[in-house]
Image (cartoon, coloured by chain):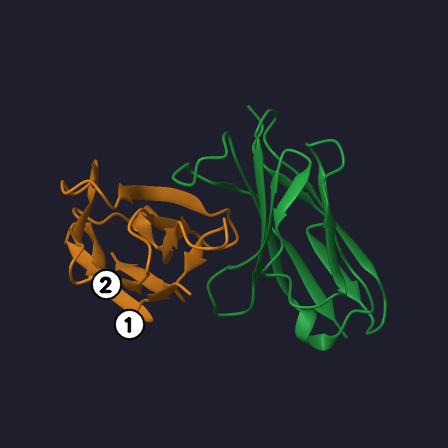
Amino acid sequence: AQTVTQSQPEMSVQEAETVTLSCTYDTSESDYYLFWYKQPPSRQMILVIRQEAYKQQNATENRFSVNFQKAAKSFSLKISDSQLGDAAMYFCGISGGGADGLTFGKGTHLIIQP
Amino acid sequence: GAGVSQSPRYKVAKRGQDVALRCDPISGHVSLFWYQQALGQGPEFLTYFQNEAQLDKSGLPSDRFFAERPEGSVSTLKIQRTQQEDSAVYLCASSSTQLRGDEQYFGPGTRLTVT
């Protein structure tokens, strides 16, 4: 079975600063994908960034980047120049296991201080 | 275009009642997923459809849960004889192909409260 652990239930950052959200995972698969999804209050989950496990280069999407350490099974999300609109729950997820759906962590609640 | 929609958005059921939750995926999307999200938790996978075929139902918590997608588009998640532990937000997601790395597009969810 796959597991995803997000050890930070809540993080707070000043607007315009940088914050890193942690995620570790466990899987016996060699081919898998890792995701960060954002769930704003009362709104739909949306994809923030995606990483293919066989690609060594870390994915980036504008202000969002990941630090993917495959050997350590770590997949952290860095948000640069934090904005008020970044406030949300962030879920780390993995695909590629026995089930075809994603396995998510418990989430990190990100607070942006103006 | 329109995103994934779900109805109803809120449902209150008395314990023992049957409920049906509807998901309208993005038109043309091959894959459809159902997740259950308990309060303060991440979504947990329930079941997966590729077109009309239910290929994985390993996450369904009991035989009271049943899902269908008869024409490969709209899907319904049915819960029979609801219990208090069924209270959660039920999320539907779709993706354009059957590839595991595809982005999943989520609906707003149906919040089920069993009293």
Residue B108 seen in the figure: no
Q: Secondary structure at mark 1?
A: loop
> What residue is pinned by disc 2?
A22
Query: In front: B104, or A109?
Result: B104
Near mark 1 (Cα within 10 A), the count class, few <14, some 14-19 or many ≥20, is some
Identify the residue at horizontal 69%, vertical 62% (top origin). B112
Specify the amino acid type for callout 2: Ser
| In the displayed structure image, the side of residue A58 where residue A35 appears, left or right | right
Q: Chain of mark 2?
A: A
Q: Chain of mark 1?
A: A
Query: In front: A7, or A88?
Result: A7
- Residue A7: image tag: 1
What shade does chain A have?
A: orange
Same chain shared by disc 2 and disc 1: yes
Image quadrant assignment for residue B37: bottom right
In which quadrant of the rendered image does the N terminus of chain A lie? bottom left
Residue A63 seen in the figure: yes
- Circles 2 and 1 in contact, beta carbons < 8 Å: yes
Query: In front: B76, or B6?
Result: B76
Q: Residue furthest right?
A: B17
Locate residue B109, reporting x and y percent.
Answer: 61, 51
Identify the residue at horizontal 69%, vertical 35% (top origin). B52
Specify the amino acid type for callout 1: Ser
Locate residue A21, reporting x and y percent.
Answer: 24, 60
Relative to residue A57, is residue B14 depicted above or below? below
Query: In front: A82, or A34?
Result: A34
The chain in green: B
Q: Earlier in the sequence, mark 2 or mark 1?
A: 1
Image quadrant assignment for residue B5: top right
| In the displayed structure image, the side of residue A61 where residue B59 appears, left or right | right
Near mark 2 (Cα within 10 A), the count class, few <14, some 14-19 or many ≥20, is some
